[in-house]
């Protein structure tokens, strides 16, 4: 019996044939966060995972959130400081 469950939390397009998916996976009784690029494969267009991504135990979720919050603040600050283009 396979002990694996996945729950797609969020997905957004990266390009015409790629998307980024945020998934919570359960494997062998442990939960993981999987943030990964997926691509459309073959004539059927089925999505397949790439090696480009991050797979972390769910215990790291609070640290990941801290990092994303800081990323958002820094990106906004840099956007505000950027010289206006005409």
Image (cartoon, helix red, strand yellow):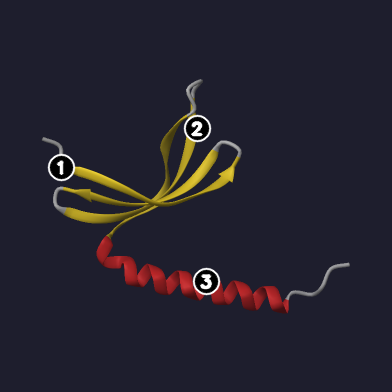
| In the image, farthest residue toward the top | 43
Task: Determine whether 11 is above or below 80 in the image.
Answer: above
Mark 2, residues whose alpha carbon is within 10 Å: few (<14), some, or many (≥20)?
Answer: some
Q: Mark 3 or mark 2, which has the lower sequence index?
A: 2
Q: CA distance from mark 3 to mark 2?
A: 29 Å
Q: Quadrant of the N terminus?
A: top left
Q: Position of residue 52 (x, y in %)?
A: 44, 46
Q: Secondary structure at mark 1?
A: loop
Q: Position of residue 41 (x, y in %)?
A: 48, 28
Q: Which quadrant holds residue 59?
A: bottom left
Q: Which mark is residue 38?
A: none
Mark 1, residues whose alpha carbon is within 10 Å: few (<14), some, or many (≥20)?
Answer: few
Looking at the image, residue 61 sits to the left or right of residue 70; the answer is left
Q: Quadrant of the C terminus?
A: bottom right
Task: Determine whether 43 is above or below 11 in the image.
Answer: above
Q: In the rendered image, which residue does mark 2 sit on? A: 40
Q: Position of residue 50 (x, y in %)?
A: 43, 40
Q: In the rendered image, which residue does mark 3 sit on? A: 71
Residue at 41% over, 74% down: 66
Residue at 50% over, 32% down: 40
Q: CA distance from mark 3 to mark 1?
A: 35 Å
| In the image, farthest residue toward the left | 1
Q: Mark 1 or mark 2, which has the lower sequence index?
A: 1
Residue at 79% over, 75% down: 83
Looking at the image, residue 54 sits to the left or right of residue 71; the answer is left
Q: Which mark is residue 3?
A: 1
């Amino acid at each position: 019996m396979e002990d694996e469950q996945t729950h797609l939390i969020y997905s957004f397009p990266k390009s015409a044939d790629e998307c980024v998916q945020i998934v919570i996976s359960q494997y062998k009784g442990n939960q993981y966060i999987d943030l990964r690029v997926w691509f459309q494969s073959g004539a059927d267009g089925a999505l397949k995972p790439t090696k480009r991504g991050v797979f972390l135990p769910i215990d790291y979720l609070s640290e990941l959130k801290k990092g994303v919050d800081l990323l958002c603040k820094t990106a906004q600050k840099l956007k505000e400081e950027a010289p206006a283009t005409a």
